[in-house]
Amino acid sequence: MIEHNLSVPSERVLVLDFGSQYTQLIARRIRELKVYTEIIPYHTPIEDIKRENPSAVILSGGPSSFYEEDAPKISKEIFNLGVPVLGICYGLYVVVNAFGGESGGATSREYGRAFISVNSNSRLLKGLGQKEQVWMSHGDKVLQMPEGFVVTASSDNAEIAAIENHNVNVYGVQFHPEVYHTTNGLKVLENFVFDICNLKPTWTMESFIDSSVDAIAKEVGNGTVLLGLSGGVDSSVTAVLLQKAIGDRLYCVFVNNGLLRKDEEKQVVERFKKYMNLNLIYVDASERFLARLKGVEDPEQKRRIIGKEFIDVFMEEAQKIGRFDFLAQGTLYPDVIESVSTKGPSDTIKSHHNRVPEVIKLIKSGKVIEPLKELFKDEVRELGVKLGMPEELIYRHPFPGPGLAIRIIGEVTKERIKILQHADDIIVQEVKDAGLYRNLWQVFGVFLPVKSVGVMGDKRTYENVVAVRAVTSVDAMTADWAYLPEDLLRRISNRIINEVKGVNRVVYDISSKPPSTIEWE
């Protein structure tokens, strides 16, 4: 069965994921058009898809070649749902095969920017110029057109770059309209969603608030909800939304796991207890978490340990409250996508602390409420604005649930935590003073488990290395390393080396996502 948020609209686009690195971008772009879009695995049973009653279906790209023996395939019944279907890249070959055409390997591969010639009679490409810049990523091509389809665009390396059949309302493109490098890609998706599918732009944060509040109140009834509050934007928005729905029957547990940023526990308690009037329970479990992490170096094991320990703490606090009906989490859509490979034929990138076995068991029992789990980060921030939350909190940079444990490479110790807290605080201070904080998706320090030789006061030193990570992004699914000014980097380096005892070298991370991830672990 397809797992839903409490308040998804009835009018929706389903994206069948064949494993493309761009699949999440398809959903994100269409949501920008205020149309709700959901990603599901390509192998979702057709009966489940029928029950969803989708308004349209999009077939994503993927790394496979359709003619390979183990290439992902779908039921041809997907084209009998009576709704428009759009195939992108690999999805194009799914369309071609379903209607009797043929695809195969191309003599010339096409990766990156390319130009297509557009047929003016196309419904999908309506409003585009005769020549358009697009983003290609393929080594295959359509060899034989399916019956009833017409070619609506071509490129130097792909004579058949777009096809459509108005009679069956099925469309296919070789290029990726969801990628920013396709200059008018959003226009292509607009044509599909509004002109071809006749959908309405009703997916707004105002409508989400109304439907979520109603759904949460109905789900919880007279029960109580226990929320793990980290102080970040995700759990904070979740808290405000839940409070709006059930009032003082929400209990927020803020756990100091010893892996927080410098002085964060004081700031969170003051902000939420004093200014937001939440039922806040503060638990200092720092020694407990550090004891569990002693000697642990593997990042996945760190995540599992921290996730399980959070659940244990929650359960203990629930018993103290006397009544606990639901656990709430600020899980976001990218967390779900990156944690499990069941969204498509992709490898698990990393497990999420909100998706450890103990939490999954609770989710299956219906005891977990995750009102944001279908939202991207920028949608959560927009939601926070609509809820009247302070900008300082809404635009705070993301902080991982496992905290500094995954920004300390190798074993987590008190000494390493103290070093990283101090260095990270300097990094963030300097970026804010330079007026660049809001321009970045994230900026933080990473403690590296290596030592290097240095000279301080004419004496040889052999101390630790701190890496600075700064990235720009729209939704965290992709990210570019940020070009910070030279004088800013110099100030950061000088301050860390001069002020943080135990560090004699600072390096700057110039890796993008993909192939790297934003966090180091």
Image (cartoon, rainbow, N blue to C red):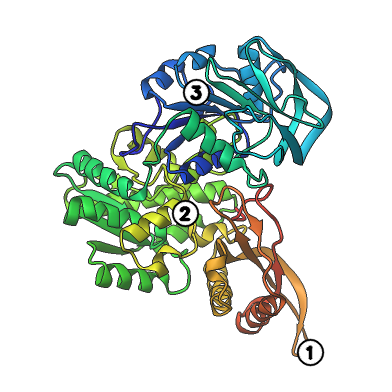
Q: Position of residue 263 (x, y in %)?
A: 43, 74
| SS type, badge 1 | loop
| 79 displayed left or right of 312 | right
Q: Which residue is mark 1?
A: 458
Q: Residues within 10 Å of mark 3 (few under 14, many from 20)?
A: many
> Looking at the picture, which amino acid does disc 3 mark?
Pro
Up/down of 311 relative to 410, above or below: above
Q: Amino acid at mark 2?
A: Asp
| Marks 3 and 2, the one that precedes in the sequence | 3
Residue drawn at point x = 21 percent, y = 50 percent: 245
- Identity of the residue drawn at 49% across and 26% down: 57
Task: Mark 2: give few (<14), some (14-19) or many (20+) Cα within 10 Å.
Answer: some
Q: Which residue is mark 2?
A: 378
Q: Nearer the viewer, residue 316 or 491?
A: 491
Instruction: Using the image, tell me which numbered label, if any, was put on residue 84.
Output: 3
Residue 94 location in percent, x, y? 62, 19
Dots 1 and 2: beta carbons under 8 Å?
A: no
Labels 1 and 2: the sequence-earlier one: 2
**What secondary structure is found at the residue carrying circle 2?**
helix
Taking the image as drawn, is residue 119 in sight?
Answer: yes
Query: Around disc 1, counting alpha carbons within 10 Å, would you say few (fewer than 14), some (14 to 19), or many (20 or more)?
Result: few
